[in-house]
Image (cartoon, rainbow, N blue to C red):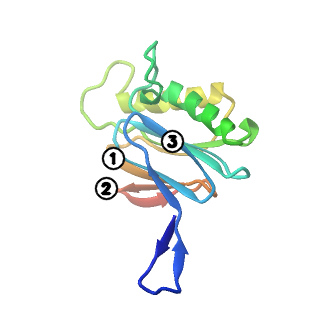
Amino acid sequence: MKVYTSNTTETRTLPERTKVGIADYAVATGNATLTTSGLGSCVGIALYDSQAGVGGLAHAMLPYADGDTDEAKYADTAIRALLEAMVEKGAKRRRIRAKIAGGSTMFEFSSADGSIGERNAVAAKETLAREDIDLVAEDVGGEHGRSLELDVSNGNLEVRSAHVGKDTI
């Protein structure tokens, strides 16, 4: 995106920013940034192929689809959809790396299987392993929300939290 200033001789090119909503995902190329916010028990899944300059970000609410067709809503199907969309944009599966964040325990109640946040993180890890995608970094758990910003050009994932601060994984 080009930004023009009041100085008629100056223009700057800023990275394209795409907002990923809840139960949503996006794939971008080149000098782009993908962002999502409001990750509590939801899990954010960032996939990238830095050599091809292709990245994807999903904001999944629940662990497994169990037949539901809303693929972005679930960690397992969101990962598969991201992989497919990234390959269509030129990524190579063997080079794709993953980072995940979120999966917090935001409420007191949970089932015998753990909190929804814990189950979301486990589902993301299991699906990545099944798809043979290396998980190279994670920031999951705790009791705080997170916002994410993926720099598609290099795979850096900035994790922000009012409770914990800012970190790049």
Q: Can you identify the residue that label 1 sits on?
A: 145
Residue 167 visible in the picture: yes
- Which kind of residue does numbered mark 1 sit on? Gly
Number of numbered markers: 3
Tell me whether circle 1 and circle 2 mark residues in contact (CB < 8 Å).
yes
Task: Count residues near mark 3 (Cα–Cα under 10 Å), then give few for <14, some for 14-19, many for 20+.
Answer: many
Q: Where residue 79 sits in the image (x, y, percent)?
A: 55, 31
Residue 6 placement (x, y as % from top left): 41, 84
User: Around disc 1, counting alpha carbons within 10 Å, would you say few (fewer than 14), some (14 to 19), or many (20 or more)?
Assistant: many
Q: Residues within 10 Å of mark 2 (few under 14, many from 20)?
A: few
Looking at the rendering, which quadrant does residue 30 occupy? Answer: bottom right
Mark 2 vs mark 3: give the one in front. 3
Q: Secondary structure at mark 1?
A: loop
The label shown at residue 26 is 3
Calculate the distance from the C-alpha at mark 1 to the C-alpha at mark 3: 21 Å
Instruction: Say if 94 sits above or below 8 in the image.
Output: above
* Residue found 44% across the figure and 80% down from its top: 5
Which residue appears at 43% of the width and 36% of the height? 24
Left or right: residue 121 versus residue 125 is left
Q: Secondary structure at mark 3?
A: strand
**Residue 37 left/right relative to 33:** left
Residue furthest to the front in view is 8
User: Gap between marks 1 and 2, in whole Å?
Assistant: 8 Å
Residue type highlighted by circle 2: His
Decide which of 5, 50 is in the foreground and name it: 5
Which is nearer the N-term, disc 1 or disc 3?
3
Residue 163: mark in rendering: 2
Say above or below: 143 vs 163. Answer: above
Choose mark 1 or mark 3, whichever is in front.
3
